Image (spheres, coloured by chain):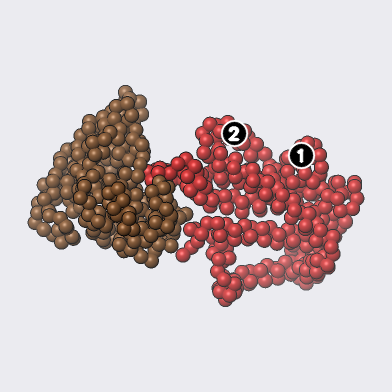
Chain colours: A red, B brown
Amino acid sequence: MVRIKATALSAATFITGEEFWRGCVAIVCFLLFWQIGSRSVDWLGFAVPAVSQIPPPTAVSHQLYVLIQEPSFWYSGYLSSVRVFEGFAAAMVIGIPLGLAMAVSRIFFGIAFPVFEVLRPIPPLAWVPASIIFWPTQELSIAFVTFLGAFFTIVINVIGGAQAIDIRYFQAARSMGSSNWDIFRRIILPGTLPSIVVGATVGVGITWAVVVAAEMISGGGSAGSMGGAAGGGLGFFIWNSYVGGSYTQIVAGMITIGIAGYISSALLRKVGDWLTPWLAEP
Amino acid sequence: MKMMAVDQGKAFPGTPRTLRRGHIRIEDAVKIYGPQNGGILAVDHCTFDVPAGEITVVVGPSGCGKTTLLNAIAGFHSLSAGAIYLDEEVLCGPGRLKAEPGPDRIVVFQNGALFPWKTNIDNVTFGPIMQGTMTPAQAYEKARHMMADAGLRGVENNYPGEISSGVRRRVEIVRALMNDPKILLLDEPYRALDSLTKSVMHEALLDIFYRTRVTVFFITHDLEEAIFLGHRVIIMTTRPCRPKKVLDIDIPHPRDYSALTTKRFRELMDETAMAVHEEAIKAFEAGEMER
């Protein structure tokens, strides 16, 4: 909620706000802790558990600086972004109508929901071997797993949102002469929109988590065997860095994914705010 | 605008009607929830009239079944037996126990049912645009006038979530009136409001009534509200509901809040308070027994 409010404010008031400075201080403290922790053997004479194994932020930022000048790194990011976008877009295009259909028709709900509920708890990553087998290309199998990550979240949100619409809205609309189509278009669709936005925002986060893992499992393997940039992506990049023993690259790759995920969610929130102006805080 | 005022006698809210309409007659209405045998009897052979062009207030304990009657008139639920007539035409009765919802009977709901995703003026124009009785331009023109008349200038382009609950209720009544209904069905519309806002809302409702003379069917559990607003107050028994006492309120209209302090008002309160209290006790004891 706080973040939603913050993005709604103009940049100027945002930077002068207390919220902004509190965030800055928090990030600086985090970086200090990390720096001191990872250098703890040299600086403090003892090893801070876990943190001392990680390269310090200075080294990671230098690594990032080097990486952003390499086209292959951008290409990895591009590949992952495309997969996220494809999977996410497919999940929206298929998930929203499916969820609405289940919410609107009791018969369809009775048929589709049990199957849906059996498939839903299966973690997307458990689909990786199966999807490698039944999709013809590596690319399609990664995109499919990515799709699954967002799909179930979006559908369940659409169903929940549509079913939670107050019955009085339907009664009022019916009294005022609305047809079934009017009710769908003017009551069910706008009434479900906030849940669609929530489902999409959560879904895109899952998509990033899934794409990276899918690339590590499948894309990495193919790139290894086929050579070159085939497969690829940020997940493969991290995995490759691990195999090659470049720990600064691992952390740099992780941070890149964090930033990419944040940008995707922020963009979706912006779109969501624009689509649901009635939810804006006065 | 001028053309519409003469158009097929469709009275323009704001102009007093010569032809009174909206007379509801409820005849031997029965409603059983659940199976016909052994279900819960909510309405028990209920018979009464809602005269056209007047405010009829139904008072009863919470959960007594008064909303069931309102839903049957509105066409949201069916009756189990009996009939309801609107201006001598059957709304529901033997053979067709559920009325069709329609713009001639508009409900103003307990907690309000403005569409939160539409601005206030888009809510107000919803009915006529849906029914195709006006072009959007005509609907917005009329909506602006009616909102201004109801003291709602300045909130047209706000969303319902941005205005106070009292103002929301006024917008909802204007939305109902835009449909040119024969009868307004109000289901405890002021229940959630604080008593100060409530008093303002009562006068606002009376003001709208005096201007439009639309028939009003008002449900409440607040006796004071009932006597202050109603031409006729019908006190219901606790579940199953049936009229216990029908009272014609002889305090002259137009009324304002000074009516509350008159001797006649206190007399009417005293006369009816006991009847309402008896039913409240019965309802309470029934509730205890169900536990």
Binning the other alpha carbons within 10 Å of mark 1 as few (below 14), some (14 to 19) or many (20 upward) gives: many
Quadrant of residue A96 within the rendered picture: top right
Residue at horizontal 18 percent and vertical 60 percent from the top: B256
- Describe residue A276's horizontal placement relative to residue B27 as left or right: right
Counting the numbered discs, the total is: 2
Q: Position of residue A161 (x, y in %)?
A: 52, 46
Secondary structure under badge 1? helix
Q: Position of residue A272 (x, y in %)?
A: 57, 57
Residue at horizontal 21 percent and vertical 46 percent from the top: B20
Residue A128, compared with residue B194, is above or below; it is: above
Q: Quadrant of the N terminus of chain B?
A: bottom left
Q: Residue at label 1?
A: A131
Residue B49, compared with residue B259, is above or below; it is: above
Residue at horizontal 35 percent and vertical 44 percent from the top: B103
Q: Residue at label 2?
A: A112
Residue at horizontal 28 percent and vertical 45 percent from the top: B182
Q: Which amino acid type corresponds to the residue marked 2 in the rendered image?
A: Ala
Work out how far the residue at label 1 is from the one at label 2, CA to CA, in angstroms: 22 Å
